[in-house]
Image: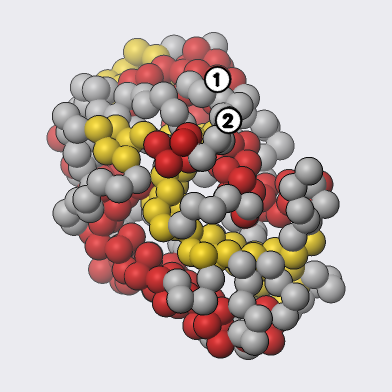
Amino acid sequence: MAATHHVLLAGGSGLIGAALADRLRTEGHRVTRLVRRDTASADEVRWDARSLDPTVLEGVDAVINLSGATVGRIPWTTRYRRTLVSSRVEPTRALAEAIVAAATPPKVFISGSAVGFYGNRPGETVSDGSERGDGFFPDLVTAWEQASAIAAGATRVVNIRTAVVVAHGGGLAPIRILTKLGLGARFSTGEQYWPWIGLRDQVRAIIHLLDSELAGPVVLAGPTPATSFAVTYAYAREMGRPHRFVVPRFAIRLLGEAGQRLLLDDLRVLPRRLQADGFEWTTRTIDRAVAAIDPEDRAD
Protein backbone atom coordinates (compact mmCIF):
# COMPACT_ATOMS: atom_id res chain seq x y z
CA MET A 1 0.00 0.00 0.00
CA ALA A 2 1.33 3.45 -0.95
CA ALA A 3 2.35 5.79 1.84
CA THR A 4 0.00 8.56 2.89
CA HIS A 5 1.11 12.14 2.43
CA HIS A 6 0.43 15.64 3.66
CA VAL A 7 -0.30 17.55 0.45
CA LEU A 8 -0.33 21.33 0.07
CA LEU A 9 -2.68 22.14 -2.82
CA ALA A 10 -2.86 25.42 -4.74
CA GLY A 11 -5.73 25.81 -7.20
CA GLY A 12 -7.96 23.42 -5.31
CA SER A 13 -11.26 25.09 -6.22
CA GLY A 14 -11.15 24.32 -9.94
CA LEU A 15 -12.44 21.28 -11.79
CA ILE A 16 -9.28 19.20 -11.37
CA GLY A 17 -8.31 20.57 -7.97
CA ALA A 18 -11.67 19.88 -6.34
CA ALA A 19 -11.78 16.33 -7.68
CA LEU A 20 -8.15 15.77 -6.67
CA ALA A 21 -8.70 17.00 -3.11
CA ASP A 22 -11.69 14.66 -2.72
CA ARG A 23 -9.75 11.66 -4.05
CA LEU A 24 -6.69 12.38 -1.90
CA ARG A 25 -8.79 12.53 1.26
CA THR A 26 -10.64 9.36 0.28
CA GLU A 27 -7.29 7.58 -0.02
CA GLY A 28 -6.26 8.74 3.44
CA HIS A 29 -3.99 11.65 2.55
CA ARG A 30 -4.07 14.93 4.43
CA VAL A 31 -4.84 17.96 2.23
CA THR A 32 -4.17 21.60 3.08
CA ARG A 33 -5.55 24.03 0.52
CA LEU A 34 -4.13 27.46 -0.27
CA VAL A 35 -6.97 29.94 -0.73
CA ARG A 36 -7.18 33.63 -1.64
CA ARG A 37 -10.08 34.45 0.67
CA ASP A 38 -10.73 34.25 4.38
CA THR A 39 -10.19 30.67 5.54
CA ALA A 40 -13.31 28.64 6.28
CA SER A 41 -11.75 25.58 7.93
CA ALA A 42 -8.61 24.38 9.65
CA ASP A 43 -7.33 22.73 6.47
CA GLU A 44 -7.04 26.04 4.60
CA VAL A 45 -4.24 28.60 4.53
CA ARG A 46 -4.74 32.07 3.07
CA TRP A 47 -2.18 33.47 0.64
CA ASP A 48 -2.01 36.14 -2.06
CA ALA A 49 -0.53 33.87 -4.77
CA ARG A 50 2.55 36.09 -4.97
CA SER A 51 4.46 34.92 -1.91
CA LEU A 52 4.22 32.16 0.68
CA ASP A 53 5.68 31.90 4.16
CA PRO A 54 8.08 28.91 3.99
CA THR A 55 6.93 27.79 7.46
CA VAL A 56 3.63 26.74 5.86
CA LEU A 57 5.62 23.88 4.33
CA GLU A 58 6.56 22.37 7.70
CA GLY A 59 5.40 18.77 7.70
CA VAL A 60 4.30 18.92 4.06
CA ASP A 61 5.36 15.97 1.88
CA ALA A 62 4.16 17.24 -1.49
CA VAL A 63 3.09 20.50 -3.11
CA ILE A 64 0.63 20.34 -6.00
CA ASN A 65 0.08 23.50 -7.99
CA LEU A 66 -2.96 23.78 -10.27
CA SER A 67 -3.23 27.58 -10.33
CA GLY A 68 -4.22 29.41 -13.50
CA ALA A 69 -7.04 31.32 -15.19
CA THR A 70 -9.05 29.39 -17.77
CA VAL A 71 -7.84 29.45 -21.38
CA GLY A 72 -11.42 28.85 -22.52
CA ARG A 73 -12.44 32.48 -22.10
CA ILE A 74 -12.80 34.22 -25.46
CA PRO A 75 -11.46 36.56 -26.74
CA TRP A 76 -7.86 36.66 -25.60
CA THR A 77 -7.47 40.39 -25.26
CA THR A 78 -4.05 41.81 -24.51
CA ARG A 79 -5.12 42.23 -20.91
CA TYR A 80 -6.44 38.67 -20.62
CA ARG A 81 -3.25 37.28 -22.16
CA ARG A 82 -1.37 38.94 -19.30
CA THR A 83 -3.81 37.33 -16.86
CA LEU A 84 -3.27 33.89 -18.40
CA VAL A 85 0.47 34.28 -17.88
CA SER A 86 0.52 35.98 -14.47
CA SER A 87 -2.10 33.64 -12.94
CA ARG A 88 0.25 30.74 -13.68
CA VAL A 89 3.74 32.13 -13.39
CA GLU A 90 3.35 34.20 -10.21
CA PRO A 91 1.86 31.46 -7.97
CA THR A 92 4.30 28.90 -9.37
CA ARG A 93 7.28 31.12 -8.66
CA ALA A 94 6.00 31.89 -5.15
CA LEU A 95 5.61 28.18 -4.35
CA ALA A 96 9.01 27.31 -5.80
CA GLU A 97 10.73 30.06 -3.82
CA ALA A 98 9.00 28.93 -0.61
CA ILE A 99 10.17 25.36 -1.25
CA VAL A 100 13.76 26.53 -1.66
CA ALA A 101 13.53 28.56 1.55
CA ALA A 102 11.84 25.82 3.60
CA ALA A 103 13.81 24.26 6.45
CA THR A 104 12.70 20.83 5.24
CA PRO A 105 11.51 21.01 1.63
CA PRO A 106 8.73 18.68 0.47
CA LYS A 107 9.76 15.57 -1.44
CA VAL A 108 7.97 16.57 -4.64
CA PHE A 109 6.56 19.64 -6.37
CA ILE A 110 3.94 18.70 -8.98
CA SER A 111 3.24 21.81 -10.98
CA GLY A 112 0.60 22.43 -13.61
CA SER A 113 1.56 22.66 -17.25
CA ALA A 114 -0.12 21.93 -20.57
CA VAL A 115 0.32 20.09 -23.85
CA GLY A 116 0.03 23.55 -25.40
CA PHE A 117 3.83 23.52 -25.02
CA TYR A 118 4.00 21.63 -28.32
CA GLY A 119 1.90 24.09 -30.33
CA ASN A 120 0.23 23.24 -33.62
CA ARG A 121 1.89 20.10 -35.07
CA PRO A 122 -0.14 18.74 -38.02
CA GLY A 123 1.15 15.45 -39.37
CA GLU A 124 3.40 14.80 -36.36
CA THR A 125 3.24 12.65 -33.25
CA VAL A 126 4.84 14.24 -30.20
CA SER A 127 5.49 13.12 -26.65
CA ASP A 128 7.03 14.28 -23.38
CA GLY A 129 10.51 15.07 -24.70
CA SER A 130 9.50 16.64 -28.02
CA GLU A 131 10.67 20.17 -28.73
CA ARG A 132 8.44 23.15 -28.03
CA GLY A 133 6.25 24.71 -30.66
CA ASP A 134 5.84 28.35 -31.66
CA GLY A 135 3.35 30.93 -30.53
CA PHE A 136 1.54 32.15 -27.44
CA PHE A 137 0.73 28.76 -25.90
CA PRO A 138 4.31 27.44 -26.06
CA ASP A 139 5.61 30.76 -24.71
CA LEU A 140 3.12 30.62 -21.83
CA VAL A 141 3.95 27.03 -20.89
CA THR A 142 7.69 27.66 -21.13
CA ALA A 143 7.47 30.59 -18.68
CA TRP A 144 5.25 28.50 -16.39
CA GLU A 145 7.70 25.60 -16.28
CA GLN A 146 10.69 27.88 -15.86
CA ALA A 147 9.07 29.29 -12.71
CA SER A 148 8.69 25.79 -11.25
CA ALA A 149 12.31 24.97 -12.09
CA ILE A 150 13.41 27.36 -9.33
CA ALA A 151 12.66 24.52 -6.90
CA ALA A 152 14.55 21.85 -8.85
CA GLY A 153 17.61 21.99 -6.61
CA ALA A 154 15.54 21.46 -3.46
CA THR A 155 13.01 18.82 -4.51
CA ARG A 156 11.77 16.62 -7.36
CA VAL A 157 9.84 18.82 -9.78
CA VAL A 158 7.23 17.34 -12.10
CA ASN A 159 5.54 19.42 -14.80
CA ILE A 160 2.22 17.81 -15.69
CA ARG A 161 1.60 18.71 -19.33
CA THR A 162 -2.13 18.21 -19.27
CA ALA A 163 -4.51 17.69 -22.18
CA VAL A 164 -8.10 18.96 -22.23
CA VAL A 165 -9.98 17.21 -19.41
CA VAL A 166 -13.13 15.33 -20.36
CA ALA A 167 -15.66 16.07 -17.63
CA HIS A 168 -19.09 17.55 -16.98
CA GLY A 169 -17.41 20.96 -16.81
CA GLY A 170 -14.06 22.22 -18.03
CA GLY A 171 -12.84 23.07 -21.50
CA LEU A 172 -15.26 20.78 -23.33
CA ALA A 173 -18.35 22.04 -21.51
CA PRO A 174 -19.45 24.23 -24.48
CA ILE A 175 -19.31 21.15 -26.74
CA ARG A 176 -21.53 19.23 -24.32
CA ILE A 177 -24.02 22.09 -24.02
CA LEU A 178 -24.31 22.64 -27.79
CA THR A 179 -24.69 18.91 -28.37
CA LYS A 180 -27.41 18.70 -25.72
CA LEU A 181 -29.27 21.44 -27.61
CA GLY A 182 -29.09 19.39 -30.80
CA LEU A 183 -26.29 21.49 -32.28
CA GLY A 184 -23.59 18.84 -32.42
CA ALA A 185 -21.05 19.87 -35.04
CA ARG A 186 -17.80 19.13 -36.74
CA PHE A 187 -15.18 21.88 -36.54
CA SER A 188 -13.68 22.50 -39.97
CA THR A 189 -12.57 19.13 -41.41
CA GLY A 190 -12.63 17.47 -38.01
CA GLU A 191 -9.33 15.81 -38.85
CA GLN A 192 -7.25 17.84 -36.39
CA TYR A 193 -6.24 15.92 -33.25
CA TRP A 194 -7.46 17.16 -29.88
CA PRO A 195 -5.46 15.86 -26.88
CA TRP A 196 -7.80 14.67 -24.12
CA ILE A 197 -7.85 12.89 -20.75
CA GLY A 198 -10.71 11.74 -18.52
CA LEU A 199 -11.05 13.60 -15.22
CA ARG A 200 -10.75 10.39 -13.19
CA ASP A 201 -7.48 9.47 -14.90
CA GLN A 202 -6.17 13.02 -14.60
CA VAL A 203 -6.62 12.83 -10.83
CA ARG A 204 -5.26 9.28 -10.61
CA ALA A 205 -2.19 10.24 -12.65
CA ILE A 206 -1.35 13.14 -10.35
CA ILE A 207 -1.62 10.86 -7.31
CA HIS A 208 0.50 8.25 -9.12
CA LEU A 209 3.24 10.87 -9.54
CA LEU A 210 3.42 11.50 -5.79
CA ASP A 211 5.30 8.22 -5.33
CA SER A 212 6.91 7.98 -8.76
CA GLU A 213 10.53 8.83 -9.49
CA LEU A 214 9.63 10.77 -12.63
CA ALA A 215 10.76 14.39 -12.83
CA GLY A 216 10.50 17.07 -15.49
CA PRO A 217 7.76 17.10 -18.13
CA VAL A 218 5.17 14.32 -18.02
CA VAL A 219 2.32 14.31 -20.52
CA LEU A 220 -1.09 13.64 -18.97
CA ALA A 221 -3.30 12.57 -21.87
CA GLY A 222 -5.38 9.60 -22.92
CA PRO A 223 -3.35 6.79 -24.52
CA THR A 224 -5.49 6.73 -27.69
CA PRO A 225 -5.32 10.01 -29.66
CA ALA A 226 -8.62 11.27 -31.05
CA THR A 227 -9.54 13.70 -33.80
CA SER A 228 -11.85 16.59 -33.04
CA PHE A 229 -14.56 14.80 -35.04
CA ALA A 230 -14.17 11.73 -32.80
CA VAL A 231 -14.50 13.93 -29.71
CA THR A 232 -17.61 15.82 -30.82
CA TYR A 233 -19.24 12.69 -32.25
CA ALA A 234 -18.60 10.81 -28.99
CA TYR A 235 -20.63 13.44 -27.15
CA ALA A 236 -23.48 13.25 -29.68
CA ARG A 237 -23.62 9.46 -29.57
CA GLU A 238 -23.51 9.29 -25.78
CA MET A 239 -26.27 11.91 -25.45
CA GLY A 240 -28.40 10.54 -28.28
CA ARG A 241 -28.32 13.85 -30.13
CA PRO A 242 -27.71 14.68 -33.81
CA HIS A 243 -24.28 15.54 -35.14
CA ARG A 244 -25.07 17.09 -38.49
CA PHE A 245 -23.60 20.59 -38.54
CA VAL A 246 -20.22 21.86 -39.72
CA VAL A 247 -18.53 24.99 -38.35
CA PRO A 248 -16.34 26.25 -41.22
CA ARG A 249 -12.79 27.36 -40.69
CA PHE A 250 -13.53 30.99 -41.58
CA ALA A 251 -16.21 31.17 -38.87
CA ILE A 252 -13.82 29.79 -36.26
CA ARG A 253 -11.23 32.37 -37.25
CA LEU A 254 -13.74 35.09 -36.38
CA LEU A 255 -13.19 34.06 -32.76
CA GLY A 256 -9.62 35.32 -33.00
CA GLU A 257 -6.49 33.48 -31.96
CA ALA A 258 -8.24 31.77 -29.04
CA GLY A 259 -10.69 30.06 -31.36
CA GLN A 260 -7.98 29.00 -33.77
CA ARG A 261 -5.71 27.62 -31.07
CA LEU A 262 -8.48 25.83 -29.15
CA LEU A 263 -10.44 24.46 -32.11
CA LEU A 264 -8.15 24.27 -35.13
CA ASP A 265 -4.71 23.36 -33.76
CA ASP A 266 -3.70 19.81 -34.61
CA LEU A 267 -1.78 18.02 -31.85
CA ARG A 268 -1.34 14.25 -31.67
CA VAL A 269 0.43 13.64 -28.36
CA LEU A 270 1.26 10.38 -26.58
CA PRO A 271 1.83 9.98 -22.80
CA ARG A 272 4.88 7.77 -23.17
CA ARG A 273 6.63 8.53 -19.87
CA LEU A 274 3.47 7.96 -17.82
CA GLN A 275 2.77 4.71 -19.63
CA ALA A 276 6.35 3.48 -19.18
CA ASP A 277 6.04 4.30 -15.46
CA GLY A 278 3.28 1.72 -15.10
CA PHE A 279 0.22 3.95 -15.01
CA GLU A 280 -3.03 2.21 -16.04
CA TRP A 281 -5.86 4.24 -17.56
CA THR A 282 -9.49 3.55 -16.65
CA THR A 283 -10.70 5.23 -19.86
CA ARG A 284 -8.37 4.47 -22.77
CA THR A 285 -10.54 5.92 -25.57
CA ILE A 286 -12.50 9.12 -26.02
CA ASP A 287 -15.74 7.12 -26.27
CA ARG A 288 -15.17 5.55 -22.87
CA ALA A 289 -14.07 8.86 -21.35
CA VAL A 290 -17.26 10.59 -22.48
CA ALA A 291 -19.39 7.65 -21.33
CA ALA A 292 -17.72 7.83 -17.90
CA ILE A 293 -18.47 11.52 -17.28
CA ASP A 294 -19.95 11.99 -13.83
CA PRO A 295 -22.80 14.53 -13.86
CA GLU A 296 -21.82 15.46 -10.33
CA ASP A 297 -18.36 16.68 -11.40
CA ARG A 298 -17.69 19.94 -9.67
CA ALA A 299 -16.93 23.26 -11.36
CA ASP A 300 -19.40 22.88 -14.22
* Residue 110 placement (x, y as % from top left): 53, 60
Which of the two labelled residues, at mark 1 and mark 2, occupies the earlier sequence position? 2
In this picture, residue 267 sits left or right of residue 29: left
In this picture, residue 257 sits left or right of residue 215: left
Give the amino acid type for the residue marked by disc 1 in the picture. Arg
Q: Is residue 219 depicted above or below 90 in this figure?
A: above
Residue behind mark 1: 288
Q: How is the image coloured?
A: secondary structure
Task: Choose top left, top right, bottom left or bottom right for residue 38.
Answer: bottom right
Q: Residues within 10 Å of mark 1 (few under 14, many from 20)?
A: some
Q: Quadrant of the N terminus?
A: top right
State the residue at coordinates (65%, 81%): 104
Q: Quadrant of the C terminus?
A: top right
In this picture, residue 150 sits left or right of residue 29: left
| Whole-number angstrom distance, CA of label 1 to CA of label 2 | 14 Å
In this picture, residue 5 sits left or right of residue 104: right
Residue behind mark 2: 280
* Residue 247 visible in the shown view: no
Q: Which mark is residue 143?
A: none
Q: Nearer the viewer, residue 205 or 261?
A: 205
Q: Is residue 24 depicted above or below 157 in this figure?
A: above
Instruction: Indicate the secondary structure of the residue bearing disc 1.
Output: helix
State the residue at coordinates (52%, 82%): 100
* Residue 140 placement (x, y as % from top left): 30, 63
Give the amino acid type for the residue marked by disc 2 in the picture. Glu
* Residue 84 placement (x, y as % from top left): 38, 65
